[in-house]
Each structure stands twice: as C-alpha cells, then as structure tokens.
Amino acid sequence: MGANGKSAGGSITLVGHDEADKHLIPEQQQQINTLHKDAGEAAAKWQTALDGLRSEMEKGSDPSDTKVQKFAKDWHDAAAAFMPANDEAVHKGVVRLLHDEPKVRQDHGLDDDRRIYLRFN
C-alpha cells in the first residue's frame, strides 16, 4: 500500500494513510480494508459519481438540481459499500478522517471545491 492510500490494484483506500491512525483503531481499519477488497463495482460507481459532480459543478449547476442530487446519492450509496453496516464508530471515524485530513480528501477526489459544493463539512 502506498503512502497515498492506493493499493497495488489502484483502488483508493483509507487504510494506508498515516492519517487514518488518528481516527480509526487498527481493527476498524482492517474491517474497511476487507470491504475494499470486494468493492470493485462500488469503487467504479464512486468515481463516476464524483466525476459527474465535478462536471455539474463546473457547469454551474445548482446543487439542488435533480441530476446533481442523483450523483450525490450515488456517491453516498457507493461510500456505504466501503464501511461495515450499522457500525456508528467506524462511520464517525471515517467522517472525521475525511473532514480533518485534506490529503485523504484529495486522494479520494473530495477536493475542497467539490466538498463545499456537496455541503460536506
């Protein structure tokens, strides 16, 4: 796993970032890593949604537009595949990680412009 959180297969993971240690205990990181191994389709949906959001943002589309909201929903649905179901502690840790760590956000396609556009903070 590289320092940028990318696995050998190229998919982006939270595990592998030094910043993850600040927000998730090793067992939580392992749970996420295990889910990432089987989340190829979700990773593709994640990227498609982020690309769509970027495109709509660059066009100046209103964030409440139906198309933008569909991309946002697709992004959230894809993100759910990367976290254990019904584990509030892991969810909160990931939210803190993405909120507090600019490098992790950047590696996951959540640049500050797109983050503001999504009202993710």
Image: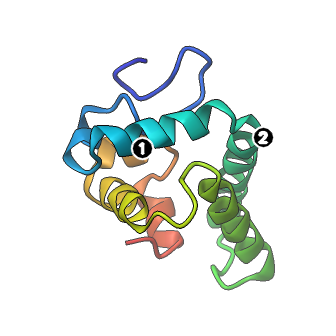
Q: Residue at x 39, y 55 (%)?
A: 94
Dividing the picture into quadrants, the one containing residue 25 is: top left
Front: mark 1 or 2: 2
Q: Is residue 91 left or right of residue 18?
A: right
Q: Is residue 87 left or right of residue 82?
A: left
Q: Residues within 10 Å of mark 1 (few under 14, many from 20)?
A: few
The image shows residue 48, relative to residue 52, as above or below, that is: above
Q: Residue at x 75, y 48 (%)?
A: 45
Q: Amino acid at mark 2?
A: Glu
Residue with the mark numbered 2: 41
Residue with the mark numbered 1: 106
- Mark 1 lies on a secondary structure that is helix
Q: Amino acid at mark 1?
A: Gln
Closer to the camera, 118 or 93?
A: 93
- Mark 2 lies on a secondary structure that is helix
Residue 18 x/y as whole percent: 25, 32
